[in-house]
Amino acid sequence: MNNVSAAAALTKRLRRTCTIDEDDLAALNALSISWRRAKSNEVIVRTGDRPSHCCVLIDGFIIRAKNTAEGQRQIIAIHQPGDIPDLQSLFLHVLDHDVIAAGDCQIGFIPHDQLRALIKVRPNVGAALWRDTLIDAAIFREWIVNVGRRSGPSRLAHLWLEIFTRLQLIDRTEGNQFRLPLTQVQIGEAIGMSAVHVNRILQAFRRDGVLDFERGTAYILDEHRLRELGGFDPLYLHLSPAL
Amino acid sequence: MNNVSAAAALTKRLRRTCTIDEDDLAALNALSISWRRAKSNEVIVRTGDRPSHCCVLIDGFIIRAKNTAEGQRQIIAIHQPGDIPDLQSLFLHVLDHDVIAAGDCQIGFIPHDQLRALIKVRPNVGAALWRDTLIDAAIFREWIVNVGRRSGPSRLAHLWLEIFTRLQLIDRTEGNQFRLPLTQVQIGEAIGMSAVHVNRILQAFRRDGVLDFERGTAYILDEHRLRELGGFDPLYLHLSPAL
DNA sequence: CGTCGTATTGAAGCGTCTCAACGTGAGTGG
DNA sequence: CCACTCACGTTGAGACGCTTCAATACGACG
């Protein structure tokens, strides 16, 4: 894993949303992207920070979380390889949430000024990045619906399908299972429920052969049933750039 | 209210986030923005639509909402004059939620191609618009926390302060009160609660002199207490573009 | 003056939380 | 290699916040 791979992760991601020509590619490869490993639960960027870099997730998972005044934590996003969790910091200079490694991961860092220069010279790369932040926002919207209106089981079903669908895009699923290095506490923080109740929901799903989760591996056992339960419609993921 | 006012609303909004020079201003005034009135509860753009325009809210309120498979509605945003609720449609071509008039309002429509041309010629306007969509996303994140982790009273307190704070920016508050043309049902849909419970929370707040709400007018009675209750920290609104 | 959307009230039920105890497995140091 | 620790998962019991249903009151409007 080196500079080339970090740029490659970024390039691969951009290819999903826009047409990259040779000039774009040259500009992307000219970026000096440093990278490092992060250990599980390491806080990569913190609320209040003013980062001078954006981070590209090369491998592993990153979560974003906010804390209430009472100290409760809500996970607001679960990121996968190729994502740029703090791309917003390019224009919103103070971070309003934490960016945390979920499981060990590898992260590339692109200096803001280089990214800004890239956007200036290659406007279609800028448009692709803008689009990326808009999809981010679309997922936030769906999460509001998830925690605001769905029952516990529905929330979990929906989360499972969202992550599964997004992981399939980048070829990180194995059949009906995928790695998800979270604890039941963290799953609860993502769907706005207590860990105890997450546990009971998981057991019910396990018993009924709908989904499973064990030591960082998630299983889709009955995809059709899950879709019903979660009311999952992938429209909000805006998977096809053409549409 | 005419074309000039619609462009003026947009210009005013942009001035809050970036420095507009004469060339920008000329380009903005050259936009041909049509406008119309919309009646309360009118659906302006619908899930699945592929709009060819973005709408600028000139006067009144607009809400955005999503429906679950079971037919429950969750309001995901409450927009104020100057906002561009469907700016995302510039890059995400299919709308994943409804855009609805909350109370009568006036809306300007900017054709996508004109907006795209503007962004191309005036990159700093593009950056300001991008920033706008990022603040939108920041508010979504806070709403996830609101419905995911806070109690009913906290949610309402937080919502009140968010709207109040944003309305103050555009001078649409009168002392400690502001217009909010929603029903208790809609407030419930915004904070993820039943209308019945919203009613009971409102009564408790009314009795305790914390906040009030009556026929489309909201009152902040004890701002300090509200801040405590809602755990409100305006950081996420990114009010100062410099920061 | 009737109608309809909205607000209010009461009562019953249940989904979820909290607290507290216990089990389990991986990692660590003696 | 065992004992200890610690994080995580599991279980039970009780409490409560919120929902649902249903009835009633109110107020704007044609």
Image (tube, coloured by chain):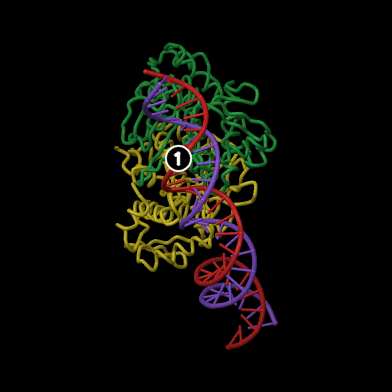
Chain colours: A yellow, B green, C purple, D red
Residue A95: % across, % down: 58, 41
x, y percent for residue A165: 35, 52
Quarter of the image with the C terminus of chain B in it: top right
Q: Taking B19 as reference, is A223 above or below it? A: below
Foreground of the two, A201 or A40: A201
Give the amino acid at mark 1. Answer: Ala
* Occupied quadrant, residue B30: top left
Total marks placed: 1
In this view of the protein, can residue A37 be seen by the observer?
Answer: no
| Location of residue B199 by image quarter | top right
Task: State the SS at label 1.
Answer: helix
Residue nearest the observer in this picture, A87 or A33: A87
Judging depth in this view, the residue of B228 and B10 nearest the camera is B228
- Locate residue A242 relative to residue B206 in the image: left or right: left
Compare residues B125 and A220 and report the one nearer the observer.
A220
Q: Residues within 10 Å of mark 1 (few under 14, many from 20)?
A: many
Residue B52, position as x, y percentages in the image: 32, 26
- Relative to B105, residue A23 above or below: below
**What chain letter is assigned to the residue under label 1?**
A
In the displayed structure, C14 sits above or below C9; it is below
User: Which residue is rendered at x = 43% and y = 19% of the image?
Assistant: B106
Whether residue B211 is visible, yes or no, is yes
In x, y percent, where is residue A126?
Answer: 43, 34
Q: Residue at x 47, y 54 (%)?
A: A2
Q: Which residue is mark 1?
A: A137
> To which quarter of the image does residue B225 belong?
top right
